[in-house]
Image (tube, grey):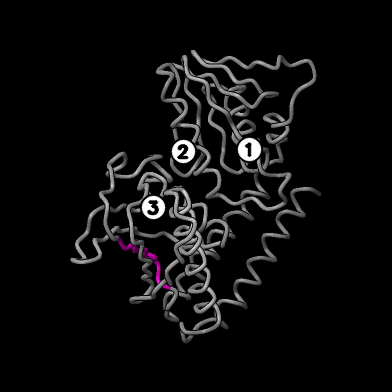
Amino acid sequence: MYVNKKAAFALHLLGLMAIALPLLAGSGEGPDYHRQSEKVNLALRRVAHLLMEEAGDTVTRIPPVVLTGDATWQVRLEHAFNYDRLPVLLHQSFELHQINMGYDVAVLDCPSGELQLGYNYIDLVEKGAVPCGGRDVQAGCYVIQVTLIESQTGTSAVLFWWLLVGGSLLAGVVYLLIKRPFLPAAAAVAGAPVAGESPLIPFGHSALAMQEQTLVAGEVRHSLTYREAKLLRLFATHPNQLLERDIILEQVWQDEGVMVGRSLDVFVSRLRKMLRDDPTVRLVSVHGVGYRLEII
């Protein structure tokens, strides 16, 4: 019965997609487009505020965000900022405002408009780092420019393509749910503490102290957030095992009620940076499947 319910739910989603997407075909300047533009505006204002605050400026008024073209927004900062903080703050702001699209980022010089720094979001979510990281931003005026890769001004042909692809994917899900017997995989890699388990979890030349939410990687100590500690515990207790994305999301984010796939990529990126201090471990991504903590 468990599998049948899941299959029925997937079929229900397929039916909703078949009804909704054709109705959305037409003008790209509808309410959804304007709502998306508003969310990007709010996300960039948040980024500008945090960058200014971290630079010690809590007085200057946050400049307006300007829509300069199709799916391109700019915000102006009158003084230097920490470029290394920009990728994480922007990614977090997009998650906060539920902007689930790819994007390019460019840092331009105000007077000349010349490109100074920049990156694509893939650099952050897959590699855990962006080009030009660690470089000092000289004193001056800068424009942070963000361009969404997939424009919201979609045509009927694009919507039809999404209907076709989405329908095929859902049909595949239904087939797998019916053909593949249910396995309690989630329970096998549960993220909750196990009774009698040692509070110190060693792996490689590192150790995770769950109660203190502390990671000692090599000889360097790192303080973790609750979610970082929970995610690392899942990896550390299953070394050299490939953990699927869905299982990781369910075990680490299930208490939030909403599981956002991009959150996992951001948190893995943070853990990778901390684990660089231990050359015997590495957090490897398997494209389209999940992640594996390898002990060398």
Mark 3: give few (<14), some (14-19) or many (20+) Cα within 10 Å.
many
Q: Which residue is mark 3?
A: 121
The magenta stretch is 142-151
Please name the residue shown 74% across and 26% down the image: 193
Left of 134 or right of it: where is 218? Answer: right
Question: Residue at image x 50%, y 82%?
Answer: 25
294 shown above or below 31: above
Q: Which mark is residue 227?
A: 1
Out of 258 and 217, give the one closest to the viewer. 217
Question: Label 2 amino acid?
Answer: Ser
Main SS type for the magenta part? strand
Between 271 and 68, the residue placed more toward the observer is 68
Instruction: Name which residue type carries label 1.
Output: Arg
205 or 61: which is nearer to us? 61
Which image quadrant: the C terminus? top left
* Element type where label 3 sits in the image: helix
Residue 268 image position (x, y, % from top left): 50, 37
Q: Is residue 83 left or right of residue 184?
A: left
Residue at image point 38% right, 75% down: 67
Q: Residues within 10 Å of mark 1 (few under 14, many from 20)?
A: some
State the mark number for residue 269: 2
**Residue 35 sits in which quadrant?**
bottom right
**CA distance separating discs 1 and 3:** 22 Å
* Residue at 52%, 50% in the rendered image: 262
